[in-house]
Image: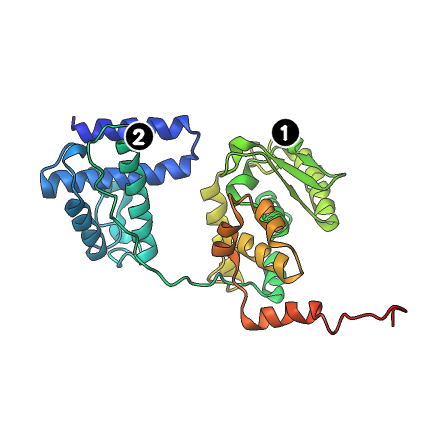
C-alpha cells in the first residue's frame, strides 16, 4: 500500500471526527484519491512528502485539459458505471469545478502540514482561478405557480415532494437539512422548525420559520402521511424510511422538465428565498442567520444578486423624501 493512501486515510478519519457531512467527505476523498492516482502514474510519487508545487500545478493543468469522467480511481468501475454514456462525457471542466478540486487539495495538504506529517507545504502558493460569478436564476411568480400546480397530489411521493418544494421556498433551508427533519422538530403553533447541529452545515443548532400558509400545508401533510406511514421523519419514503437527497433531486428534475424550467434545482429554491426576502425589505443580517451562514460576507457573496431594477423597486419603498411626514402626520 502506498504511503499516500495511509495519509489519505488519516485525513478522512479527521474529517469524520470533525463531524463533516458525508457529501463533503465524499467530495474530499474523491478528489484526493484521483490526485494520488495521477501522482503515482505520471510522477512516480507514493508519499505526500515528495509532492511539490510543480506537481500540483501540472495536475491542475491536466484537469483543465482532460474531459469529464475520463479518469476514475478504479478502472474496473467503468464497465458498470459506463461514463461514456453520459451526455457531458469528455466535456471540459469549468473553472468553478477546477476551483473545487483546488480547494479540496489545499484542505488535504494543509492538514498534513499542520499535523507535521509532511515537512513542507506544496499548496502555499497554489491559487484558485479567478471566475466571473454567474447570477443565480430567479424564478418568476408565474413559473413557481406553474411548478407547484404540476404535482399529482393523489400520489404519495408527489404530494410529499410538493410540500418539500414549498417548505424550502418558504424557509430557505438546504435540501439535506429539510430531509432530516423529524416530526418532533416541528412546532406548528410557533411556526418554526429546529435544525439540530448534527444536521446543519455549520454544525450549530438553528431555527427556521415558516408562514401561516405553510403551517396549514404542513398540518394537512402530517395528517395525510400518518394515515399511510408510521415514520419519525417529516418527509419519508412510502416505507417510512429516510428520503435520500439524490432521490428527491432526481424526482425534482422531472417536475421542472414537465413545466419547461431548465435552470431550476432544489438549491435554486433556497437562492430565490434569499432574494425574495431581501426584495421585501428583509434585513441581510437576519437573512444570514436564517440561512445558517458563518458570516454576513458569505451571504453577500453567495446570494446578493440584486439587479438595477431590483434596487429601484426596493428604493421606491424606502425613499426618504417620499416617506417624509409632518408633525401632524400629513
* Count of numbered badges drawn on the protein: 2
- Asked which secondary structure carries label 1, the reply is loop
Does residue 266 show up? Answer: no
Q: Residue shown at 10%/42% (left/top)?
A: 43
Mark 1 or 2: the one toward you: 2
Residue 239 drawn at (x, y percent): 55, 32
Residue 322 drawn at (x, y percent): 75, 73
Location of residue 15 with respect to 260 vertically, above or below: above
Say which residue label 1 marks.
230
For residue 62, side relative to residue 264 (left or right): left
Name the image quarter holding the C terminus. Answer: bottom right
Q: Nearer the viewer, residue 223 or 283?
A: 283
Q: Nearer the viewer, residue 102 or 30?
A: 102
Location of residue 297 with respect to 109 vertically, above or below: below
Does residue 111 show up? Answer: yes
Q: Residue shown at 24%/37% (left/top)?
A: 33
Name the image quarter holding the N terminus. Answer: top left
The quadrant in which residue 112 appears is top left
The quadrant in which residue 319 appears is bottom right
Q: Nearer the viewer, residue 26 or 157?
A: 26
Q: Residue shown at 33%/48% (left/top)?
A: 100
Say which residue label 2 marks.
11
Residue 98 drawn at (x, y percent): 29, 52
Amino acid at each position: 500500500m502506498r504511503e499516500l493512501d495511509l495519509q489519505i486515510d488519516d485525513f478522512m478519519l479527521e474529517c469524520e471526527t470533525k463531524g463533516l457531512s458525508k457529501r463533503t467527505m465524499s467530495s474530499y476523498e474523491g478528489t484526493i484519491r484521483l490526485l494520488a492516482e495521477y501522482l503515482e502514474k505520471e510522477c512516480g510519487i507514493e508519499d505526500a512528502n515528495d509532492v511539490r508545487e510543480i506537481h500540483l500545478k501540472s495536475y491542475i493543468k491536466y484537469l483543465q485539459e482532460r474531459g469529464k469522467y475520463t479518469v476514475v480511481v478504479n478502472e474496473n468501475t467503468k464497465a458498470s458505471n459506463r461514463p461514456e454514456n453520459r451526455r457531458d462525457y469528455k466535456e471540459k471542466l469549468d473553472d468553478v469545478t477546477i476551483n473545487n478540486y483546488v480547494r479540496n487539495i489545499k484542505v488535504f495538504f494543509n492538514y498534513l502540514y499542520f499535523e507535521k506529517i509532511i515537512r513542507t507545504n506544496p499548496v502555499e502558493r497554489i491559487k484558485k482561478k479567478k471566475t466571473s460569478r454567474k447570477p443565480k436564476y430567479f424564478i418568476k411568480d408565474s413559473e413557481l405557480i406553474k411548478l407547484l400546480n404540476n404535482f399529482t397530489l393523489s400520489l404519495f411521493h408527489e404530494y410529499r415532494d410538493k410540500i418539500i418544494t414549498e417548505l424550502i421556498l418558504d424557509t430557505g433551508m438546504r435540501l439535506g437539512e429539510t430531509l432530516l427533519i423529524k416530526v418532533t422538530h416541528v412546532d406548528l403553533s410557533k411556526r418554526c422548525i429546529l435544525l439540530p447541529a448534527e444536521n446543519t452545515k455549520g454544525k450549530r443548532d438553528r431555527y427556521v420559520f415558516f408562514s401561516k400558509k405553510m403551517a396549514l400545508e404542513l398540518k394537512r401533510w402530517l395528517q395525510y402521511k400518518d394515515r399511510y406511514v408510521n415514520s419519525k421523519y417529516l418527509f419519508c419514503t412510502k416505507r417510512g424510511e429516510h428520503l435520500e437527497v439524490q432521490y428527491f433531486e432526481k424526482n425534482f428534475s422531472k417536475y421542472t422538465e414537465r413545466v419547461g424550467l431548465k435552470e431550476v434545482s432544489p438549491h435554486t429554491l433556497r437562492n430565490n428565498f434569499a432574494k425574495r426576502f431581501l426584495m421585501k425589505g428583509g434585513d441581510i443580517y437576519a437573512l444570514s442567520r436564517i440561512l445558517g451562514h458563518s458570516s454576513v460576507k458569505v451571504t453577500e457573496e453567495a446570494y446578493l444578486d440584486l439587479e438595477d431594477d431590483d434596487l429601484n423597486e426596493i428604493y421606491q419603498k424606502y425613499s426618504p423624501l417620499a416617506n417624509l411626514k409632518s408633525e401632524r402626520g400629513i
